[in-house]
Image (spheres, helix red, strand yellow):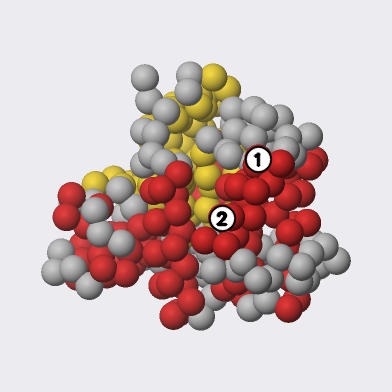
Amino acid sequence: MSFLKVQNIQHTYFTKDSRTTALSDISLTVEEGEFVSILGPSGCGKTTLLSIISSLIKPTQGTVLLENKPVSTANNDIGYMLQQDYLFPWKTIEENILLGLKLSKQLTEKNKSAALSLLQQMGLGDVEKQLPKQLSGGMRQRVALVRTLATEPKLLMLDEPFSALDYQTKLKLEDLVSQTLDEFGKTAILVTHDIGEAIAMSDRVYLLSSRPGRIHKTFEMPEELKTLSPFNSRNHEAYPSLFQTIWKELESLEQGNG
Ligand SMILES: Nc1ncnc2c1ncn2[C@@H]1O[C@H](COP(=O)(O)OP(=O)(O)OP(=O)(O)O)[C@@H](O)[C@H]1O
């Protein structure tokens, strides 16, 4: 039994006078603790696929099972880390990271201190009482990660979480996120436009083609990269040729010959 099983997804958006098939014939599985990425040209259906996996939209066809059950939006099955941090500007960092627990009526002394100690572990122990606007973009994304992990979701959806950050912050955050998810044994799906990021962070990369989005190719990352941090993966000798291979495939898709 796979942890996450996405079977034969097809999705068509209907409007009054048009229909767009965004996804067709998508099947994939993710095992517990794995990190996979979804890469593809603009408009290939990445966001649609994430929304279907999270059960925010119901696919026209197909099923999604998490631990053999349909995904539930009610019981913290899914946690999100998005391009924008969506921290509430009028709430302190502490209030922001505890909000999910509070709303789902799970706030206890135990998980409160776990969340605060994770904040400390992220190097943010001294900003608890500050407001989001007092923090840099990278710090705010670290807060967003703590808030996401605080509710102990089974599956994490990372939708371009580093794309608004400067390059150096992004590389540092990739390492921190990767290390934290490993430590917690979390399973994650990353949507990205960044080939390097996908290679450096993932166990497996799914390359989608567009109109409709299908799985064009699946790239299993070599074992020697899987065990390295994202930063060290980018500097490994296996990295440039993998980058070239995926780059060429993506180029061919963008030129419509895929
Ligand atoms: N609500 C909607 N109604 C109609 N068509 C939609 C809707 N949402 C998305 N689409 C279409 O479905 C296709 C896939 O869109 P989606 O946003 O999932 O792609 P994406 O890969 O996330 O794009 P990008 O990389 O540009 O963010 C596109 O052709 C888009 O125009």
Residue 88 in sight from this viewpoint: yes
Image quarter (top left, top right, bottom left or bottom right) of the C terminus: bottom left
Is 13 on the left-hand or right-hand side of 130?
left
- Secondary structure under tag 1 reads helix
Front of the two marks 2 and 1 = 1
Is 4 on the left-hand or right-hand side of 89?
left
Residue 15 in sight from this viewpoint: no
For residue 239, above or below residue 206: below
For the residues marked 2 and 1, what is the alpha-carbon distance in whole angstroms?
Answer: 12 Å
Report x, y in % for residue 198: 36, 59
Which mark is drawn over residue 209?
Answer: none
Is 164 on the left-hand or right-hand side of 109?
left
Report x, y in % for residue 165: 54, 75
Viewer-nearest residue: 233 or 43: 233
Q: Amino acid at mark 2?
A: Leu
For residue 235, above or below residue 32: below
Q: Which residue is mark 2?
A: 118
Image quarter (top left, top right, bottom left or bottom right) of the N terminus: top left
Report x, y in % for residue 167: 45, 79
Check contact, mark 2 vs mark 1: CB within 8 A. Answer: no
Q: Amino acid at mark 1?
A: Lys
Mark 2 neighbour density, 10 Å: few (under 14) some (14–19) many (20 or more): many
Residue at 58%, 39% in the rendered image: 152
Residue at 51%, 80% in the rendered image: 166
Viewer-nearest residue: 110 or 226: 110
Q: Which residue is mark 1?
A: 110
